[in-house]
Image (spheres, rainbow, N blue to C red):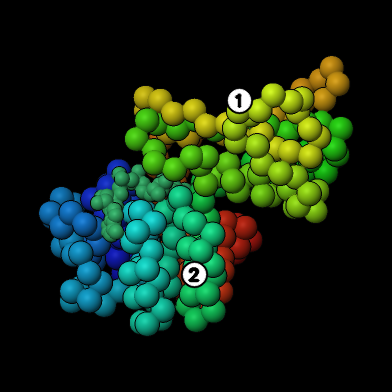
């Protein structure tokens, strides 16, 4: 049995992750961490890790970048593996995540769905085959409550494609402020926010007289919860280091 502490437990993802864990018999939530410490999901909720009075094996974090110092600090000091699913992290935050992974196992991905991780691989393959003759644009769509833009997943897609081009491409987030033709060495990034869209990502490769589009659409938040819980049960017992969906898929 894997005992889990869920950070951000009273948020939208916290509720979905709780429901996902409640359906399984190989793991359970022993406590939650949230700014709002109401007990909404059947387990005690604290604002500080030091108040948790039970032993646990792993932390899942779906909260907010402001929670990161506490989550990482506790994880490193107590050698507890951690799954970080929170997005909107700054470069400095990501550097801190990597530093923490030197002493504790850290599972980190901007998108916990298996399908999106396949999309990343397909986009890399398309970029390698199509080369620099095709213009690349990424469009992401999310609900109107999302705080960060572009989405962490759009950045992950852009970075993965950029690796194929030896990181030569710039990202253009704001074409409307310029009056110039589209240069070759860029990836256009576009964010749409509205209603209850769970998460859609589209990579467009536009060439001369032909367009290839590959896309992923999440119909519910459950896909992210299932991935995060699988990541949590996987990472317990791993050596310190950075892990992602590729490691999880290869472990199966
Ligand atoms: N990696 C993925 O696959 C994936 C998928 C979906 C959402 N997310 C990310 O997960 C995060 C949470 O999403 P959500 O939709 O549940 O958001 P939400 O706003 O509904 O919930 C966030 C919860 O975190 C709590 N919180 C905020 N700051 C905190 C702090 N400093 N300490 C402790 N708790 C704090 C809030 O009180 C709230 O209950 C976001 O960053 C979102 O982008 C990631």
Q: Secondary structure at mark 1?
A: helix
Left-right relation of 160 to 109: right
Q: Can residue 230 be seen in the rendering of this structure?
A: no
Q: Give residue 176's position: percent from left, percent from top.
A: 60, 25
Position of 137 relative to 44 (above/below): above
Q: Position of residue 227 (x, y in %)?
A: 47, 52
Specify the quadrant of the image occupied by residue 147. Answer: top left
The quarter in which the C terminus is drawn is bottom right
Nearer-the-camera pick, 52 or 17: 52
User: Would you place residue 104 above or below residue 186 in this image?
Assistant: below
Q: Is 96 on the left-hand or right-hand side of 27? A: right
Q: Disc 2 designates what residue?
A: 96
Residue 95: which quarter of the image?
A: bottom right
- Nearer the N terminus, badge 1 or badge 2? 2
| Circle 1 residues within 10 Å: few <14, some 14–19, many ≥20 | few
User: Which of the labelled discs sits on residue 76, or is there none?
Assistant: none
Percent x, y of residue 121: 70, 46
Badge 1 vs badge 2, beta-carbon distance below 8 Å: no
Q: Could you tell me if residue 206 is visible in this image?
A: yes
Q: Determine the residue positioned at 54% across, 79% down.
A: 102
Residue shown at the point (59%, 46%) measured from the top left: 155
**127 lies left or right of 227:** right
Report which residue position mark 1 lands on.
176
């Amino acid at each position: 049995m894997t005992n889990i502490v869920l950070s951000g437990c009273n948020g939208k993802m916290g509720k979905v992750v709780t429901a996902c864990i409640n359906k399984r018999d190989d793991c359970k939530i022993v406590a939650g961490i949230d700014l709002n410490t109401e007990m909404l999901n059947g387990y005690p909720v604290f604002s500080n890790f030091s108040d948790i009075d039970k032993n646990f094996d792993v932390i899942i974090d779906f909260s907010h970048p402001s929670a990161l110092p506490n989550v990482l600090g506790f994880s490193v000091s107590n050698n507890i593996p951690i799954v970080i699913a929170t997005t909107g992290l700054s470069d400095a935050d990501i550097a801190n995540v990597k530093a923490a992974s030197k002493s504790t196992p850290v599972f980190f991905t901007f998108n916990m769905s298996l399908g999106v991780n396949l999309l990343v691989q397909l986009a890399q393959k398309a970029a390698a085959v199509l080369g620099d003759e095709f213009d690349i644009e990424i469009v992401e769509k999310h609900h109107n409550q999302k705080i960060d833009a572009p989405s962490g997943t759009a950045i992950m897609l852009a970075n993965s494609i950029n690796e194929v081009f030896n990181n030569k491409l710039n990202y253009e987030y704001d074409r409307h402020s310029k009056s110039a033709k589209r240069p070759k060495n860029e990836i256009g990034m576009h964010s749409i926010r509205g209603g209850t869209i769970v998460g859609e990502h589209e990579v467009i490769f536009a060439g001369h007289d032909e367009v290839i589009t590959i896309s992923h659409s999440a119909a519910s938040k459950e896909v992210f919860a299932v991935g995060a819980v699988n990541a949590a049960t996987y990472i317990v017992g791993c050596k310190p280091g950075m892990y992602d969906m590729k490691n999880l898929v290869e472990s199966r």
